[in-house]
Image (tube, coloured by chain):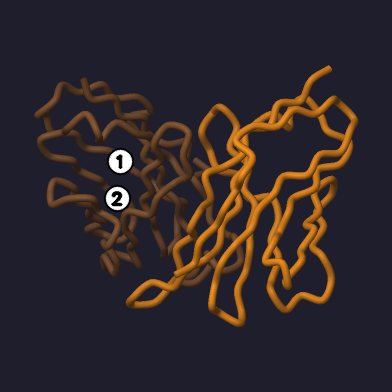
């Protein structure tokens, strides 16, 4: 069964600095995807970035990039030039197949990021 | 509205009461998911609809939990005889296509926070 592990319950970073949020995963599938979502205090889950297991390059979306190391089964999120608005919970997630078709997302336990002045 | 709408945003129930949580997905979205998020944890899958068909309900924690989507749009999650361990945020998510969870194109609501006293 797929499993997502996030070992950092909380992280602090100074404004304008870069920060790396760790995510390791376990799956027996050859083809899979990995996601990062942001959850601000309002509660809504916001999609940030996606990495496919067969993508040749690490995914990037603006200030977000994925440090994808397939052999180590890790997909760490790098946020560059941190902003106060980046303070939120961050979740790593992986799709798992559902009976009857479709996929659900399995989430890690999350990392609470606090950006400081 | 443009996004996934959930109501009520906050609900306080006495132990033993029944509650109903509503999700209004983005118009035209085929897939609809319910997740339960306990404090400090990642969201846990509850159930999945494709149009009006409930294709997977493997995550529902007990037979006190019931979900429906009778016309393939609005969905209701009902919890009967609420217990304290039901206290959590209940998130609804929708997507345009089946399998869109594979590409991260899941749109989440802000959730309904249930507190059972």
Q: Which chain is orange?
A: A
Q: Residue at x 64, y 32 (%)?
A: A10
- Residue A69 percent across, percent down from the top left: 76, 66
User: Judging from the image, what secondary structure is the residue with disc 1 in?
Assistant: strand
Q: Which chain is brown?
A: B
Q: Residue at x 67, y 66 (%)?
A: A73
In the rendering, which numbered label is found on residue B39? none
**Up-down: is B82 above or below B63?**
above
Q: Chain of mark 2?
A: B
Mark 2–mark 1 Cα distance, whole angstroms, equals 6 Å
**Up-down: is B7 above or below A56?**
above
Q: Which residue is mark 2?
A: B75
CB under 8 Å between callouts 2 and 1?
yes
Image-based side of B64 in relation to B71, left or right: left
Image-based side of B18 in relation to A39, left or right: left
Instruction: Mark 1: give few (<14), some (14-19) or many (20+) Cα within 10 Å.
Output: many
**Up-down: is B104 above or below B55?**
above
| Residue sticking out furthest to the top | A117
Q: Residue at x 69, y 71 (%)?
A: A52
Q: Quadrant of the C terminus of chain B?
A: top left
Q: Which residue is mark 1?
A: B22
């Amino acid at each position: 069964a797929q499993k997502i592990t996030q070992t950092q319950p909380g992280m602090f970073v100074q404004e304008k600095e870069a920060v790396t949020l760790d995510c390791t995963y376990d799956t027996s599938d050859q083809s899979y995807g990995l996601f990062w979502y942001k959850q601000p205090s309002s509660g809504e889950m916001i999609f940030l970035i996606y990495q496919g297991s067969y993508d040749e390059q690490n995914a990037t979306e603006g200030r977000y990039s994925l440090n994808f190391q397939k052999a180590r089964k890790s997909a760490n999120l790098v946020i560059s030039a941190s902003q106060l608005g980046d303070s939120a919970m961050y979740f790593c997630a992986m799709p798992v197949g559902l009976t009857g078709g479709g996929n659900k997302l399995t989430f890690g336990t999350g990392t609470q990021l606090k950006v400081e002045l | 509205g443009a996004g996934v709408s959930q109501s009520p945003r906050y609900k306080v129930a006495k132990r033993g009461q029944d509650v109903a949580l509503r999700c209004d997905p983005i118009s035209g979205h085929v897939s609809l998911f319910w997740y339960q998020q306990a404090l400090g944890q990642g969201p846990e899958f509850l159930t999945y609809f494709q149009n009006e068909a409930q294709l997977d309900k493997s995550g529902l924690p007990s037979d006190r939990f019931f979900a429906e989507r009778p016309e393939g749009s609005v969905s209701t999650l009902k919890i009967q005889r609420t217990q304290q361990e039901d206290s959590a945020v209940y998130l609804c998510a929708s997507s345009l296509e089946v399998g869109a969870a594979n590409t991260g194109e899941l749109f989440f609501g802000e959730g309904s926070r249930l507190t059972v006293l």
